[in-house]
Image (spheres, rainbow, N blue to C red):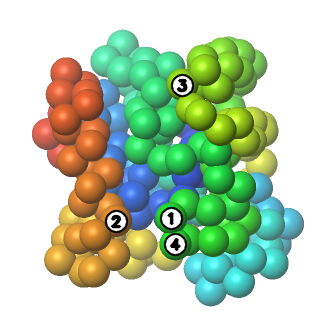
Amino acid sequence: MTTEIATLGGGCFWCLEAVYQEVAGVLHVESGYTGGQVDNPNYEQVCGGKTGHAEVVRLEFDPDVVSYRQLLVIFFTIHDPTTLNRQGNDVGTQYRSVIYFHTPQQQEIARRVIAEMAQVWDAPVITELSAETTYYKAEDYHQNYFRNNPNQGYCAFVVAPKVTKLRTTFPSLLGHGKAAG
């Protein structure tokens, strides 16, 4: 089996992680940080908004089961790509909408999907598209956060609705929560 990597930032990484753990063909989901200027940042530094990093998820996926394009369509369905440095009450550059590509093919697919999504949203899509720079895995307590804390307030009121939206919008892409965190 040949796998690929996708790196996406669309608000709090707990939301994206929980959603992509449900998708068939996504083999591993990891929360982390990329796009900044500080080596080995920690959560507090990134949340402070001064490192330049975005909260992201890094997905290892099987393109024979789920395509990169499908992952991006999910991405644009579960977050608002029209708000600059904001998702709901999460505000700051660390919550920006961004796609970090790993290959020229991913870059081209992402450009096409962004153009398609610009036709769907009422406001301009401001999602950044950049080559991934150095990636840093987030602290262990951020991994599998929703699975480990489903009743925590943020999880119940922000993360859970995004998982529900995935399940109702893309039932044919579900893998029933099998992806490892």
- Amino acid at the residue labelled 3: Val
Q: Earlier in the sequence, mark 3 or mark 2?
A: 3
Q: Earlier in the sequence, mark 3 or mark 4?
A: 4
Q: CA distance from mark 4 to mark 1?
A: 4 Å
Question: At 50% from the left edge and 20% from the top edge, which residue is drawn?
Answer: 69
Q: Are marks 4 and 1 in contact (CB under 8 Å)?
A: yes
| Residue 85, above or below 129 | below
Residue indicated by mark 4: 89
| Residue 33, above or below 65 | below
Question: At 27% from the left edge and 80% from the top edge, which residue is drawn?
Answer: 153
- Amino acid at the residue labelled 4: Asn
Q: Are marks 2 and 1 in contact (CB under 8 Å)?
A: yes
Residue indicated by mark 3: 120
Q: Nearer the viewer, mark 3 or mark 2?
A: 3
Q: Residue 47, position in %: x, y?
A: 64, 79
Residue 38 is labelled as: none
Q: Earlier in the sequence, mark 4 or mark 2?
A: 4
Q: CA distance from mark 3 to mark 4?
A: 23 Å
Residue indicated by mark 2: 158
In the figure, is residue 24 to the left or right of 80? left
Q: Residue 132, position in %: x, y?
A: 73, 43
- Amino acid at the residue labelled 2: Val
